[in-house]
Amino acid sequence: MSALNIVILAAGKGTRMYSEKPKVLHALAGKPLVQHVLDCATALQPQQICVVYGHGGEAVPQAMRQYAAQFVIQEPQLGTGHAVQQAMPHLANNGNTLVLYGDVPLIQHSTLHQMQQAGSGLVLLTVDLDNPAGYGRIVRNEQGDVLSIVEEKDASPEQRAIREVNTGILLAPTGKLREWLANLRNNNAQGEYYLTDIVGMAVQQGIAVHTVQPAHEWEIHGVNSKAQLAALERARQQVEASRLLSHGVTLADPARIEVRGRLICGRDVEIDVGCVFEGDVTLGDNVRVGAYSIIRNAVIAGGACIAPYSLIDSSEVGADCHIGPYARLRPGTKLHDSVHIGNFVEVKNSEIGSGSKANHLSYIGDSTIGSRVNIGAGTITCNYDGANKHRTIIEDDVFIGSDTQLVAPVRVGKGATIGAGSTITQDAPEGELSLSRSKQTTINGWKRPTKEKI
Ligand code: UD1
Ligand code: MG
């Protein structure tokens, strides 16, 4: 396949978003619009990617600096043809140039690949719409050959009746594109330099104009308003839900799952309503995720049950663990097999051995906990001394009584027991009972105060 340049137009104001943020930085499925396009572009392995930006100053190149792309400013913005012109000095003349749009995020690799296969000459991506209003129309002769694209504002009533529209995405021989762009005029209804005028030029020179249609209409939808963004988000989530269903995942309601990243599921996974998956998430075989849980950048091993309203972030959960309801696993948590983390338990930067349990109302931070440990309700690791963080080490088979504070750095030896209500400031020896408690006393004859009558 011949060498490829990709130009991504992203200079539009996005006035109808009513936002200070450049339009292409608004997120769809957890990722800025333009990033979807950059990811798709990168997958085509082009020799060069050039992003034309304008509104919002440096915010776009700054947000996308991880990409091997050239960023070129278009100022002022005089139309789509003028926008592509800004990129041309940065493009090698060999091969073809593909024009994409920073606000058309769901274009698929397969469709662009099909355009590359369509033959030499100019290739347009078009689509037939029931309501073509607002789009440029594809004008063909009686043989069906493309003659030109006419913008709605410049179209005759007959042309407006045409249902085949220009998506804007096109592929052109780079040398020819350069020549055509140099000849654009802005003598049209909008006083703009239309990229679409290159079609008429190609036809005049006898250069073939091919058209390709996308597999799905949502691939070519652009975002101009929050309503369109929300509609496209739904389309994207529906596609993702269908993909999961087709792989055998049980979704309580395909319309009530959000995937903002990459979700990989094993066999017989069940996901209840309202769950959000962000970043890279892997769910092993037979994992069940309860309603309204949020799981971000995590690996959940087979058989684990995540009960409702749990939040798991950058953590590893071992096989057959039981998490939640209302549990919070913060970054750096690694749970071995069959660990139970119950309601209102927060775990951060800690490793917990197999079969250990913390079922109620605890904070476990910066800790290393062995196997078969029982952490009583209300136990807190005091990991922070106001300046530094310290580790708590709890060895295998320890029993920590309820409402214990473990003041780190501290170690509880293998098989030790800590009495309920203790504040442990020194290492607790293996196999022994340690506790810190003031003696219980009883004041005989003490009476509760009563309300005074006035
Ligand atoms: C354009 C097409 C039209 C097509 C429609 C599809 C032209 C002349 N018309 O119309 O045939 O049906 O898209 O949506 O190309 N942009 C810049 N700089 C500019 C102008 C636009 O970067 O100076 C970018 C915008 O950010 C946007 C895209 O180009 O991403 C399209 O611009 P827009 O003004 O929306 O084009 P339309 O008038 O809708
Ligand atoms: Mg316009």
Image: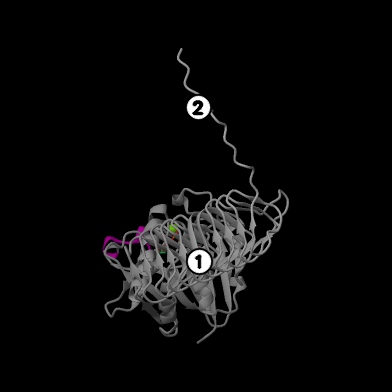
Q: Which residue occupies 62% across, 50% down? A: 422
Q: Percent position (x, y) of residue 10?
A: 52, 62
Q: Percent position (x, y) of residue 334?
A: 57, 67
Q: Is residue 187 visible?
A: no
Q: Is residue 157 magenta?
A: yes
- Please state which of residues 240 and 251 is positioned toward the viewer in this rendering: 251
Q: Percent position (x, y) of residue 62?
A: 62, 60
Residue situated furthest right in the rendering? 387
Q: Which mark is residue 134?
A: none
Is ligand 1 within 8 Å of the beta carbon of the residue shown at mark 1?
A: no
Vertical arrangement, residue 409 with respect to residue 180, above or below = above
Quick one: label 2, few (<14), some, or many (20+) residues within 10 Å?
Answer: few
Disc 1 residue type (three-letter): Val
Q: Is residue 161 magenta?
A: no
Q: Is residue 315 visible?
A: yes
Q: Percent position (x, y) of residue 408?
A: 69, 55
**Which residue carries the number 1 mark?**
339
Q: Which residues are magenta?
A: 151-159
Q: Main secondary structure of the magenta part?
A: helix
Q: Name the colour scheme.
A: one colour
**Which residue carries the number 2 mark?**
448
Disc 2 residue type (three-letter): Arg
Q: Of helix, strand and loop, which one carries label 2?
A: loop
- View quadrant of ligand 1: bottom left
Front: mark 2 or 1: 2
Q: Which tag, 2 or 1, sits closer to the chain's start? A: 1
